[in-house]
Structures are given as structure tokens and as C-alpha cells.
Amino acid sequence: MSDPKCIFCRIIAADIPTKKVYEDDHVFAFEDTNPQAPTHVLIIPKKHFAGLKEAEAGDAELIGRCHLAAAQIARERKIEQGYRTVLNVGPGAGQSVFHLHVHLLGGRPLTWPPG
Ligand code: AMP
């Protein structure tokens, strides 16, 4: 369920301090330490799995819950004019932490396509 070597599992367990934004039975959200926008929140499932590539059918609800938490945070922060949810999948896309996470980015104009 959790991996003691995973930095995000250690954040959930409060072994590593973080600025918590949201938590429920399934999902945890916290401020990114290297924000790329005025709002940059990471939303993660409490269950450890490496990323979208490694997700299984049984993880579908958890992935949906992460996105619904992102939408709720965006609503609370009043950034609904335009925000982005991003999953970096694999090192070639910039994934550096191998515990699935949804980036919520907003609070500034977001250009397309992303780099
Ligand atoms: P990714 O590159 O998509 O794997 O995203 C990983 C994100 O985790 C990056 O945006 C990092 O800034 C962020 N990050 C890494 N360590 C921490 C931490 N201890 N607390 C909060 N955010 C972190």
C-alpha cells in the first residue's frame, strides 16, 4: 500500500513536513516546493503506485478522485477561469517522483502547447 522509500508516501505519513492543502481517506494534496504558477498543488492517491503507466483498472476511481480534488481546490482558490491538471508520465516527460501525482497549476495565463 505504501513504500517507505517513496518521498510522497513519507509526506503522507508526516515523516517529511509539507504544506497540506487537502486530505481525505483516499487522497492527499500539498503545495509543490518548486511552484511553477501562483497555484501549484500536487494531488496524490494515498495508495502507492508509480504513475499512470503502472496504474491498473482498480486504480481508476483513485485517479478520478485526485482530479475531483484538484477541481475542488481550484474552486476554493477562485482560479476556475483557467487552470491545468497535468500528469507527467515517465522521465522523458519530466516525471521525477514515481508515485502518481496530479499537478494543479493556475493563477496565471497558461500557454499551449506546454514545453
Ligand atoms: P514530477 O516532475 O512530475 O515527477 O513532479 C514532482 C514534483 O514534486 C516537482 O514539481 C517537485 O517540485 C515536487 N516535489 C518534490 N519533492 C517535494 C516535496 N518534498 N514537497 C513538495 N513537492 C515536492
Image (spheres, rainbow, N blue to C red):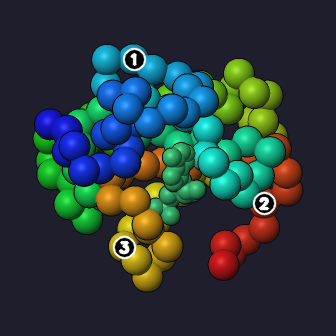
Residue under label 2, please give it: 110
Left or right placement of residue 51 versus residue 106 in this view:
left
Q: Nearer the viewer, residue 18 or 65?
A: 18
Residue 50 versus residue 9 in the image, above or below:
below
Q: How far apart are marks 2 and 1 (CA)?
A: 29 Å
Q: Which of 39 and 66 is in front in this view?
A: 39
Q: Which residue lies furthest to the bottom in this view?
A: 92
Q: What element carries label 2?
A: loop
Q: What residue type is labelled 3?
A: Gly
Q: What residue type is labelled 2?
A: Leu
Residue under label 1, please give it: 24
Q: Within 10 angstroms of label 1, few (less than 14), some, or many (20 or more) residues?
A: few
Disc 3 + disc 2, Cβ < 8 Å = no
Q: Within 10 angstroms of label 2, few (less than 14), some, or many (20 or more) residues?
A: few
Q: Which residue lies furthest to the top in this view?
A: 24
Q: What element carries label 3?
A: loop
Q: Which of marks 3 and 2 is nearer the N terminus?
A: 3
Residue 60 at x, y = what percent?
25, 42
Residue under label 3, please give it: 90
Q: Is mark 1 on a helix, strand or loop?
A: loop
In the picture, the disc for residue 42 is: none
Q: Earlier in the sequence, mark 2 or mark 1?
A: 1
